[in-house]
Image (cartoon, rainbow, N blue to C red):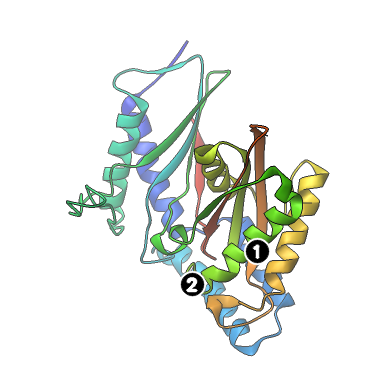
Amino acid sequence: MRVISFDSVVTTVAGLCGQAACILPDDVLAALHTSRQKESGELALDFFDQYIRNAELAKNEQLPLCQDTGFAVFFAEMGADVKLDKGTLYEAVNEGVRQGYLKFFLRKSIVADPLFDRKNTRDNTPCILHLKQVPGEQLKLTLAPKGGGSENMSALKMLKPSDGRQGVVDFVVDSVVKAGGNPCPPTVVGVGIGGTMEYAAFMAKKALLRKIGEPSADPRYADLEAEILQKINASGVGSQGLGGDITSLAVHIEYHPCHLASLPVAVNLNCHAARHAEVIL
């Protein structure tokens, strides 16, 4: 059994908050450069130049990529032979978020109650923590801050099994096109297929963590990703919804077995500042 210090998790999470807010992952930055080369629209090209320049400034000056520093969403893989010396992982991660958002002067965007008491919690807690137990003695933490603009364009539909592949394609493409400029395209499109209603939504968000340029390991789903991406980019929505050749940088699909009567499909979008950071303790 390996014991990890509660305080070390707090410190690590606080650092992740700053890293995720200010440093665009290499694969996303590379995708922006590649997409710029494919873009022909004059206005869209100007946008791409601004995205790339913004990423450089944010990294060099240690400033947030976007004023919306998002809901702190964590994906944790905790080894079965790992325990904390005190408290719970949820408590440690929340304390790390509290300290990180204060230390790096990140905007606090969380309200205490969604409907009746929408008062800011002032420290961006509580976080969202998805915890998975895995073999081993390591703790892997991945933070994906989620801005409100892109999150608000999420979509879920319980398709009929008879809708099949075409139903999935039509729903995903339609969801992205209807979103227009709201999620600050070019976007990364996460898609969850199968499972149950809530698990499809979880998979759609988790799919956003895959490195851009890495297709699904299943060639059938890799082909589906490519088809959906081609149709989205043919829509002409473009950067910021103002036209262009590139509306999305990538489409990533996660899938899971489902009930014979169901075909759940969820869509979750990331803006061009597709932020995430991870660490292994």
Mark 2 residue type: Asn
* SS for dot 1: helix
Please state the horizontal and vertical placement of residue 102, each as a whole percent of the image.
Answer: 25, 51
Please state the horizontal and vertical placement of residue 225, each as a whole percent of the image.
Answer: 73, 54
Instruction: Tell me where residue 147 sits by quadrant.
Output: bottom left
* SS for dot 2: helix
Please name whichever residue, 277 or 192, is drawn nearer the observer in this view of the structure. Answer: 192
Question: Looking at the image, can residue 115 be seen?
Answer: yes
> Which residue is identified by label 1?
173
Q: Residue at x 35, y 35 (%)?
A: 93
Task: Classify 106 as above or below 230.
Answer: above
Task: Classify 218 as above or below 59.
Answer: above
Q: Earlier in the sequence, mark 2 or mark 1?
A: 2
Give the number of the mark in front: 2 or 1: 1
Disc 2 and disc 1: Cα gap in Å? 28 Å
Please state the horizontal and vertical placement of residue 92, each as a whole percent of the image.
Answer: 32, 31
Mark 2 crowd level (few <14, some 14–19, many ≥20, 10 Å Cα): some
Q: Residue at x 33, y 26 (%)?
A: 6
Question: Looking at the image, can residue 212 be seen?
Answer: no
Please state the horizontal and vertical placement of residue 45, each as a whole percent of the image.
Answer: 62, 83
Task: Classify 40 as above or below 206.
Answer: below
Q: Residue at x 77, y 49 (%)?
A: 222
> Which residue is identified by label 2?
54
Mark 1 residue type: Val
Please name whichever residue, 206 or 273, is drawn nearer the observer in this view of the structure. Answer: 206
Instruction: Tell me where residue 136 sits by quadrant.
Output: top right
